[in-house]
């Protein structure tokens, strides 16, 4: 048994200590705490450990709400006060900007927060038949493992979905294809909830009856996915309307399919949208590119402000959805959408988009290095709002914008899009300083 005093939290929510000059990352430990821990993995330069006993407890420690916390890999910070979680994420962002990007924002924006529990409007649950656990498991993966957590509830899912988990297990256990059904994807819209069952084998007639009964009882739609994301089809009820979410402040409603990318936390997304539009400040007559635009989450509010939007997205089906959403909201005259792989962006391909006054960038975790490297020559928007789900790639891209492309980092802040987890969503504003 070893003893350590925790100095800080790492980006995965583990306590960081130094013992005999070696870094130790300890699961379940908080800054300021003194803990006894077991070493789980030894590496030449660091160790991974797990708390066994708290010798001194942090004032920021709270009781985890979920009985599965510690085992389930869905959350890593339930033992930490919600405000402290936000502060830690803020520091993760600032550290990344300072150490990776060697940049410092002129302003730190107040953190964007929403509900701490029941916020998760979409989830991908793994399904596995495990005889030793008494049947079928439906849940997130266990922490750092490919095992499925034995979950009967989930505090970050909306309560209605959490309550549905035991029934989902029972439902799958009773299907003839229970061993050929590896995943259930959940998507919640403003008016309806969809469950997509990934099936490697067609359901039998009796399976279809059970699935339909489940849908009626829980007031959800059941869809099947026999192959890739585009293969999904509605099993029951046959005539229900599709998924959509609204952004009331901008008077837009976006339709989506259960397997499309949408922001997980609707409440935080709405505030993030307000902040993004304040920073971008779209004006009539401007041409603004929304890069990695998905189904138009940012494009439509930008167009609603009167600017012309050039939406670029890698997924052809999302481009179609964005164009349909724009048309349905009466914004088609202000938008155009194109399917382009932005990881291959070059100065020429960016110049081909025409004059751009401003950019909104919201890339996946990999960031937007090709895009930022392609800026500064013929394509030099005067303002860039960069929304990021990975502080490390944001910081790397910020370094290029600030040290090579003539921009200043006017401000940065976090949005607590994923409370109880260590995921950090951030927003940054870059302004061109050179003409
Ligand atoms: C974080 S999501 C943002 C989507 C949208 N802005 C929103 O708020 O809903 C990132 C988007 O980038 C798209 N994407 C991923 N790789 C891409 C690539 N290489 N080129 C263009 N788009 C890509 C994904 O399909 C996804 O829609």
Image (spheres, rainbow, N blue to C red):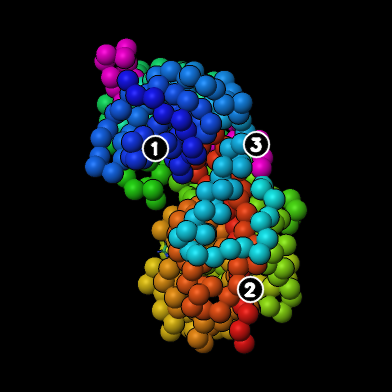
Picture quarter with the N terminus: top left
Whether residues under marks 3 and 1 lie with C-beta atoms below 8 angstroms apart, the answer is no
Where, by quadrant of the figure, is residue 346 drawn?
bottom left
User: From what the image shows, is residue 275 above or below residue 71?
Assistant: below
Kindly identify the residue that appears in the image at 73 percent across and 73 percent down: 283
Kindly identify the residue that appears in the image at 31 percent across and 32 percent down: 145
Q: Secondary structure at mark 3?
A: helix
Left or right relative to 338: residue 324: right
Whether residues under marks 2 and 3 lie with C-beta atoms below 8 angstroms apart, the answer is no
Residue for badge 1: 18
The one nearer the camera, 3 or 66, is 3
- Mark earlier in primary sequence (2, 3): 3
Q: Position of residue 307 (x, y in %)?
A: 69, 73
Instruction: Please rate how many residues cluster around mark 2, counting C-alpha atoms within 10 Å: few if below 14, some from 14 to 19, many from 20.
Output: some
Where, by quadrant of the figure, is residue 40 drawn?
top left
Q: Would residue 93 be seen by someone viewing this image from the given angle? A: yes
Whether residues under marks 1 and 2 lie with C-beta atoms below 8 angstroms apart, the answer is no
Whether the residue carrying mark 1 lies under 8 Å from ligand 1 is answered with no
Residue for badge 2: 431
Q: Position of residue 328 (x, y in %)?
A: 64, 59
What is the number of the mark on residue 83? 3
Measured in 3D between alpha carbons, the distance from the residue under mark 1 to the one under mark 2, in whole angstroms, is 40 Å
The verdict on residue 118 being magenta is yes
Which of labels 3 and 1 is toward the front? Answer: 1
State the extent of the magenta-drawn residues as a range: 113-136
Whether the residue carrying mark 3 lies under 8 Å from ligand 1 is answered with no
Furthest residue toward front: 20
The one nearer the camera, 196 or 77, is 77
Instruction: Please rate how many residues cluster around mark 1, counting C-alpha atoms within 10 Å: few if below 14, some from 14 to 19, many from 20.
Output: some
């Amino acid at each position: 048994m070893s003893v350590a005093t925790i100095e800080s939290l790492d980006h995965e929510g583990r306590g960081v200590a130094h013992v005999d000059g070696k870094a130790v990352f300890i699961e379940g430990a908080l800054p300021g705490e003194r803990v006894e821990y077991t070493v789980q993995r030894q590496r030449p330069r660091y160790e991974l450990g797990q708390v066994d006993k708290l010798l001194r407890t942090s004032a920021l420690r709270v009781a985890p709400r979920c009985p599965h916390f510690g085992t389930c890999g869905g959350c890593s910070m339930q033992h930490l006060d919600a405000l402290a979680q936000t502060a830690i994420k803020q520091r993760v962002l600032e550290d990344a900007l300072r150490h990776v990007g060697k940049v410092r924002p002129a302003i730190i924006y107040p953190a964007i927060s929403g509900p701490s529990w029941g916020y998760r409007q979409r989830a991908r649950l793994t399904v596995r038949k495990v005889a030793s656990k008494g049947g079928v498991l439906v849940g997130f993966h266990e922490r750092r493992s490919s095992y499925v957590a034995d979950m009967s509830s989930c505090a970050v899912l909306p309560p209605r979905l959490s309550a549905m988990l035991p029934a989902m297990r029972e439902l799958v256990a009773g299907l003839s294809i229970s061993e050929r059904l590896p995943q259930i994807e959940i998507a919640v819209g403003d008016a309806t909830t969809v469950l997509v069952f990934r099936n490697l084998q067609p359901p039998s007639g009796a399976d279809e009856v059970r699935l339909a009964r489940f849908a009626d009882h829980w007031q959800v739609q059941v869809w099947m996915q026999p192959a890739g994301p585009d293969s999904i089809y509605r099993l029951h009820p046959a005539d229900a309307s599709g998924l959509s979410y609204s952004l009331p402040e901008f008077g837009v409603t976006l339709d989506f399919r259960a397997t499309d990318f949408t922001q997980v936390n609707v409440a935080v997304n709405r505030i993030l949208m307000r902040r993004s539009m304040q920073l971008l400040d779209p004006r009539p007559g401007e041409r603004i590119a929304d890069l990695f635009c998905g189904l138009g989450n940012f494009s439509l509010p930008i167009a609603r402000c009167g600017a012309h939007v050039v939406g670029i997205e890698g997924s052809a089906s999302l481009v179609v959805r964005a164009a349909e959403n724009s048309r349905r909201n009466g914004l088609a005259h202000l938008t155009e959408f194109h399917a382009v792989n932005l990881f291959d962006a070059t100065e020429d391909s960016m110049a081909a988009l025409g004059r751009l006054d401003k950019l909104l960038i919201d890339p996946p975790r990999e960031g937007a290095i090709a895009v930022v490297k392609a800026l500064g020559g013929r394509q030099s928007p005067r303002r860039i709002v960069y929304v990021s789900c990975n502080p490390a790639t944001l910081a790397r891209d910020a370094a290029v914008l600030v040290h090579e492309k003539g921009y200043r980092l006017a401000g940065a802040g976090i949005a607590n899009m994923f409370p109880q987890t260590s995921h950090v969503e951030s927003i940054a504003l870059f302004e061109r300083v050179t003409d």
